[in-house]
Image: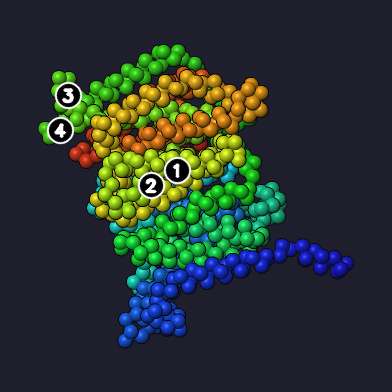
Amino acid sequence: MYSDASPLHAQRPTLPARLPMAAAALWFTAFLASALPWLNQLEPAALLSAFWTFNPDSYPSVLAHFSWAPRVSMAILVGAALGLAGAVTQQILGNPLASPTTLGVAAGSQFGVTVASLFFPGVLAFSPDLPAIAGGLLAIAMVIALTWRLGFSPVTVILAGLVITFFLGAMNMAFLLLKGEWLGNLFIWGAGSLMQNNWQPFINLWPRVLILASLMLLLMRPLQLLQLGETSANSLGARVSWVRASALFLVVMLSATVVSRVGVIAFVGLAAPVLARLLGARTLESRIGWSTMLGGGLLLLADTLAHLASSWGDGSLIPTGTTTALIGGPIILLALQGFRNAHHMPGQTSTPAGFLPRRRPAGIVCAIVAALLLLTVSISMGWSPGLDGWSWTQVSQWNDAWVWRGPRMLAAILAGVALGLAGTLIQRMTGNPMGSPEMLGISGGAALLMVVVVLSGLEAGRTVQLIAATGGAAGALGLLIILARRHRFAGNQLLLGGLALYVFMDAGLRLVMASGGTEASKLLSWMYGSTWLVSESEAIGLLVFVLAISAMLAAIVRPLTILPLGDISASSLGLSVGRARLLLLLLAAVMTAAATVVIGPLSFVGLIAPHLARVLGQQTVGRQLQTAALVGGLLLGVADYFSRIVVYPNQLPAGLLAALVGGLYFLWGLSRHGRA
């Protein structure tokens, strides 16, 4: 009877040799790169001794002890903590894309610290952990509430998490633009920096990390049972709901504690578990152990690269959070190869839609929306605050007022039209009502290259910036086509590829926020849709472009009508599905890029406009295109007007207001789909 024990024991997954070898190579490379600049000043033994002592007669020894050694120790500690948090999060949700960053915990923690800095400084002085933990819990609660009815579908969880991240980021940006003199340093910290000048931060952090990590390890056995399924786990005595809630609470506590000390260090919690899994870690114990170890090595390497980049440049700070975010896009794409999503994307249901609004005459609906648009134009041109309070500008004086109000208003309306048309194309092409042109990363590509040009120190005028943004949009489109080509430009792959591109944009945003300076401030305003930078020639150019594109839309009605029937049905009707999707993608990308290069990467207008067109009863392709174009123009026209008057005499970017409203709409759409 004992002879069977050996074969059973042999079935336990063995650890591939490549895993410890890769971990050792990572740690050796990271530590050597970090120590290399010091080896011409100190002997290796003296440098290693800097972790516990120093020579008071040697300045390099003092500097290494109080600067280099604490920074290396902090990088290893924070990376290990985030790697552990990411591995536990993925086990809880059964989702290889889950991490504190993709679930919005990091952004929520930063939001909590921002709100506390402005309104409750006493709480922040008492403990920076409390507002960070509260913000992280708020973010994770929103993700769970939005996605639990969908069975925590990997794609849906990531969509919800990233939209919550973007929404809370927009809130943070609104506070920064309004209270920049108070929050400037906070956002330098928020970009993620491990710079140290003593051991006190490390001494304060490591006991907290150790306690929380120990509590997580106590949940090891219940977490192992989760992979058997909820029913089996309950039958074995595990209280699944309690285990998930407790583990998620500990994840938020650990992540928020780290964020409150060093800022947002993005995607280490995603990268470390993914690498551990790809290198052969199969059991939960091995994934947690090796994720923790790989996380420490990854962050040490990323921090070393950030430090070297700052030294090689003009002295500007390159935050560690930026270098870690740059690896997030490839990690998302790499992780996507390791699972098959058995759940539908939001909006891709196999049953008839639960909400089908009554059809209404297109002429009447378009006339009403157009009348509202004309009313918006009239109010925007005529009714505004001034030095003497609110006053009405006579029509005879609109020619003078046009210089200040006209170009920005026209550009906002035309950008809304372009995004409304592009959003309709994307949603019809992918069959996914939760899709939008912003989610494809086209706007992110334009913004990212513009960041690079501005921060390179070149004398970049408005024309150069526009050319750079156009090139970035084209590059993002090309990369997206390459990523989605093998899947015949299917909706899931397009959206996930766009999310990967968004990650790179986020890295650029954090770099801009940390760099400071006048150019960075202007660029941040543009990136959130500041229409006050638009000139009359740019507005007129956008008008000509939108009119030209609108004349071409009649040729795409048939493909857009056939594609939602499915690939097989569309092919049987004589439509080349791959070619049709590529052409539609090109058209949508060009319209999105045109709006982006003029007034920045506006967010969610391309999502809201097609939905409102459906709500207004326009179901067919042609009618939805017309109505969505007018609705998009109306939305951004109103946003531009309110951006001028809400905080007068200051101004908010119109795109920021649209992002806040659009983010709420996106989250409401996810929750409504879950109830359906």
> Which mark is first along the chain, 2 or 3?
3
Asked if residue 215 shows in the view, the reply is no
What amino acid type is highlighted by mark number 2?
Leu
Between 636 and 591, the one lying in front of the other is 591
Q: Where is residue 216? Give x, y as percent.
A: 56, 62
What amino acid type is highlighted by mark number 1?
Gly
> Which mark is first along the chain, 1 or 4?
4
Give the CA separation, mark 3 to mark 2: 36 Å
Q: Residues within 10 Å of mark 4 (few under 14, many from 20)?
A: few
Q: Mark 3 points at which residue?
A: 399
Closest to the camera, between mark 2 and mark 4, is: 2
Give the CA separation, mark 3 to mark 4: 17 Å
Q: Which residue is drawn at 86% across and 68% down?
A: 3
Task: Name the mark on residue 475.
Answer: 1
Q: Where is residue 212? Give x, y as percent.
A: 51, 64
What amino acid type is highlighted by mark number 3?
Asn
Q: Identify the secondary structure beneath mark 3.
A: helix
